[in-house]
Image (cartoon, rainbow, N blue to C red):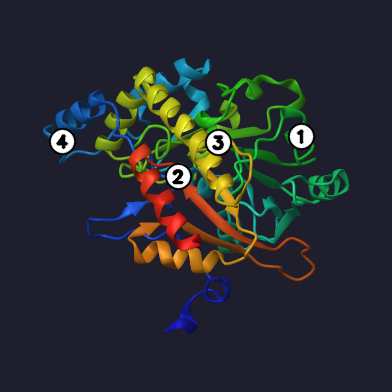
Amino acid sequence: MASVLRPAISAMPGYTPGEQPQESGWIKLNTNENPYPPSPTVVDAIRQEASGPLNIYPDPGATEFRKAAAALYGVDPDWVLPANGSDENLTIITRAFCDADDRQGYPYPSYVLYETLAQIQGCPIERLLLDENWQWTPEDATRLRESCKVFFVPNPNSPSGTVWSPEQLLELLPNHGILVLDEAYGDFVEQPHRGELLHDPRFDGRLVITRTFSKSYSLAGIRFGFCLAHPDLVQGMNRVKDSYNCDAVAIAAATAAINDQPWMLNNTRKILATRSRLAEQLTTLGFHVCPGQANFIWVTHPSGEHRGIYEQLKQRRILIRLMTFPHSGGDRRGLEGLRITIGTDQQVQVLVDALKQILD
């Protein structure tokens, strides 16, 4: 049966998400979920929507959500495109802007789903190789800016948590294409912004910003995201999205969540405080902690026994993410390490106590 698949699909490995155990009793620090619940207004909105007429289609344009997001980001609603998670925004972008053989680029190591989406579309993928400080060279940036139609940049980056400045991001704006700024973790940075770059004339209106509700808004189980871009770009992307890509319950939940900024910001502050304490504790245990600005941290251990640490934690029903970015062809960047989601103080203390036993 595999012979009837497109050759590109048969050849690609596909994206592998983090483990999601279905039984209770685990401490999950592997998929960057928020350890705190969403706003009570979100729960109320879900209940109200679920008791309504679910036999009819939802608003295809998620009008009320677009109004709320537009007000927060200082744009008109026609700058906003809701989606079934920000991953769908990335899919829509790939479908809307790239023909087969149009090149796409992304920093490496980072979110490898970009590579999967390019392969599905039949697009060559270009890796912008990062050095040990998670930076690129101007020469590499120039080369990829000239060759790529779409360039994806997660900012903050995963798995490092690195934040790049507007001036650095400008180096990656394709000469004849768009720059996609993936801000899945944007609410966890020291100085979060609200789409100011969309109005920066240096980006020539060719910037798309994507956001998700899975992280800072505690709604990973709902699947809702959105992107911000010039209305001409949004209009084009609208042509390739599914007719009713966001369900009624998700729209109601996301609208309530974005309207309760104090709740989200309070949860974010707690996560950042725990992140700081965990970084100090892991440094004391001998880990190298990469300075980052997200709801996770990237660590390596001088022993190189990352798989062993991961496996022993898993035996204790503690999940973190073992990540390996291998050399590929002429790539000079290959590494292995552990990405640890910031949980509650109690969850993090259980992790630290377990690591003390493992490393003793």
Foreground: 147 or 308?
A: 308
Question: Which residue, given by chain and number where applicable, does mark 3 sit on?
Answer: 183
Binning the other alpha carbons within 10 Å of mark 1 as few (below 14), some (14 to 19) or many (20 upward) gives some
Question: Which residue, given by chain and number where applicable, does mark 4 sit on?
Answer: 50
**Residue farthest to the right, as pictured:** 139
Binning the other alpha carbons within 10 Å of mark 2 as few (below 14), some (14 to 19) or many (20 upward) gives some
Please identify, in this view, whether the residue under mark 2 or under mark 1 is nearer the observer.
1
Question: Which residue, given by chain and number where applicable, does mark 2 sit on?
Answer: 241
Whole-percent x, y for residue 350 in the image? 36, 49
Tell which circle, 4 or 2, labels the residue nearer the N-terminal end. Answer: 4
Q: Is residue 14 above or below residue 167?
A: below
What amino acid does circle 1 point to? Gln
Tell which circle, 2 or 3, labels the residue nearer the N-terminal end. Answer: 3
Whole-percent x, y for residue 135 in the image? 76, 44
Tell which circle, 1 or 3, labels the residue nearer the N-terminal end. Answer: 1
**Discs 4, 1 touching: Cβ within 8 Å:** no
Residue 339 visible in the snapshot: yes
Question: Which residue, given by chain and number where applicable, does mark 1 sit on?
Answer: 168
Q: CA distance from mark 4 to mark 3?
A: 30 Å
What amino acid does circle 3 point to? Glu
User: Which residue is depicted at the point 58% across and 51% down?
Assistant: 299
Q: CA distance from mark 1 to mark 3?
A: 15 Å
Quarter location, residue 186: top right
**Discs 4, 3 touching: Cβ within 8 Å:** no
User: Which residue is depicted at the point 84% across and 50% down?
Assistant: 140
Q: CA distance from mark 2 to mark 1?
A: 31 Å
What amino acid does circle 4 point to? Ala
What amino acid does circle 2 point to? Lys
